[in-house]
Image (cartoon, helix red, strand yellow):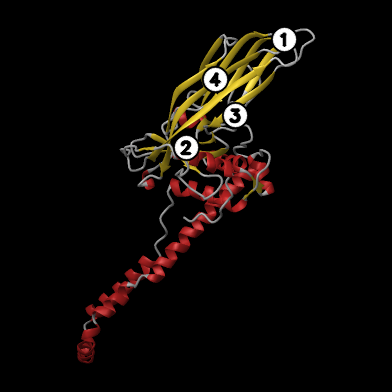
């Protein structure tokens, strides 16, 4: 299937990726299943995250900051190489959210006098691999209903309206277009292939004169029946129905639909239904629509937050029943089942709950700060750091 439209990818993301790739690459062994995604060379770079908190409007107490940190996952490894933590920070640790969906840096400061600064900045060495498509995606199927990883990513989440009537209609249109395309290809192949009758005629061209003599002498009824049987078989072959599309092809049709119906345009975050109606959106909006369509079609899917960008992943099982995640690009050159640009991965998922933010369903486990000003004071200022070096 051909992806028919290109989007413009943020220059900053490309520059950041190029800066990392200049530092070196690491090879990765091939997977055991031909249906599994393959890891390409690993790109090594330094990445820094943290927070600098200043009591700029009076003394503050009970300060707690949460900062997104690079995520360990199959295609990315993370190692701490430097920690810059001020004496005012009394507790510094990490926690995981949604199992292995996000990694948060937790910074705790009992108090800051007016004008004091609390600082916690960590530098990591991050190795991120590109992802190559599977060698044989026809082996893939929907995951088992007992697969816990799959269940987590089938329900609605913020900005992703699973099962909405507009999303259902979009899925139906995408799959109908795929079926029409498959039938057209099947019909074209049948027209291009010589029939069995044509082949038989060509094979006997050299014997035409002899056949004519035999006909004059009286051809047997059996010979005539044989030719009729060959022609009938050829006609039956040309009318065979097209093969059913694989689940991989169906998901690819959903991806093509998002690219065909949404023009890339930088802007605010939008829900899947909103971007479908407006027809314009950025990488987040395109990803939200794809994820909503996948989940509506019972294919687990999720958003992936990387440095200066978002893309999406879908989840299928190989011939052994083992599940794998496959990425799709939401900006720049279309890429289905592969990720050609290694970007630092910060989060996988789109529905987080954080105890410090009660009652909120979060698309991102984003940076957040709490603190209590002393009487007459104000909230502290904070600078969040998230940058490649």
Q: Nearer the viewer, residue 265 or 174?
A: 265
Q: Which mark is residue 59?
A: 1
Q: Which mark is residue 364?
A: 3
Residue with the mark numbered 2: 20
Disc 4 versus disc 3: nearer the observer: 4
Report the side of 154 relative to 378 (left or right). left
Work out whether residue 354 can be spotted.
no
The disc, 1 or 3, on the residue closer to the chain's N-terminal end is: 1
Where is residue 373 drawn, in percent x and y? Answer: 73, 11
Q: Secondary structure at mark 3?
A: loop
Where is residue 48 drawn, in percent x and y? Answer: 53, 27
Where is residue 367 drawn, in percent x and y? Answer: 61, 24
Report the side of 144 relative to 306 (left or right). left
Crowding near the residue tagged with mark 2, few <14, some 14–19, many ≥20 C-alpha atoms within 10 Å: many
Residue with the mark numbered 4: 105
Distance from disc 4 to disc 2, alpha carbons, whole Å, reads 23 Å
Q: Nearer the viewer, residue 233 or 16?
A: 16
């Amino acid at each position: 299937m051909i992806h028919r439209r290109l989007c413009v990818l943020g220059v900053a993301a490309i520059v950041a990726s190029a800066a990392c790739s200049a530092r070196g690459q690491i090879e990765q062994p091939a997977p055991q299943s031909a249906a599994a995604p393959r890891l390409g060379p690993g790109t090594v770079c330094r990445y820094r995250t943290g927070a600098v908190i200043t009591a700029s409007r009076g003394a503050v107490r009970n300060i707690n900051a949460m900062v997104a940190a690079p995520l360990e996952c199959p295609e990315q490894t993370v190692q701490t190489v430097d920690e810059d933590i001020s004496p005012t920070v009394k507790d510094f640790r990490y926690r995981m959210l949604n199992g292995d969906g996000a990694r948060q840096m937790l910074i705790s400061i009992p108090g800051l006098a007016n004008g004091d600064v609390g600082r916690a900045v960590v530098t990591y060495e991050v190795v991120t691999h590109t992802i190559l498509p599977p060698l044989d995606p026809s082996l893939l199927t929907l995951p088992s209903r007992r697969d816990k990883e799959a269940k987590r990513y089938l329900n609605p989440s913020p900005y992703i309206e699973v099962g909405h009537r507009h999303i259902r209609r979009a899925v139906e249109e995408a799959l109908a277009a795929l079926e029409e395309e498959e039938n057209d290809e099947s019909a074209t192949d049948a027209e291009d292939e010589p029939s069995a009758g044509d082949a038989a005629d060509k094979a006997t061209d050299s014997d035409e004169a002899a056949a004519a003599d035999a006909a004059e002498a009286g051809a047997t009824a059996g010979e005539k029946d044989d030719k009729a049987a060959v022609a009938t078989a050829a006609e039956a072959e040309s009318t065979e129905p097209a093969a059913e599309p694989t689940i991989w092809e169906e998901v690819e049709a959903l991806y093509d639909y998002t690219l065909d119906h949404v023009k890339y345009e930088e802007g605010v975050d939008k829900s899947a239904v909103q971007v479908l109606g407006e027809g314009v959106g950025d990488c987040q909006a395109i990803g939200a629509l794809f994820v909503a369509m996948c989940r509506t079609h019972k294919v687990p899917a999720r958003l992936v937050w990387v440095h200066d960008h978002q893309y999406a992943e879908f989840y299928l099982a190989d011939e052994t029943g083992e599940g794998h995640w496959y990425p799709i690009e939401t900006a720049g050159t279309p890429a289905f089942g592969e990720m050609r640009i290694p970007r630092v991965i910060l989060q996988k998922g789109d529905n987080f709950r954080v105890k410090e933010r009660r009652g909120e369903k979060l698309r991102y486990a984003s940076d957040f700060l709490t603190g209590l000003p002393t009487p007459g004071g104000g909230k502290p200022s904070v600078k969040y750091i998230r940058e490649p070096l």
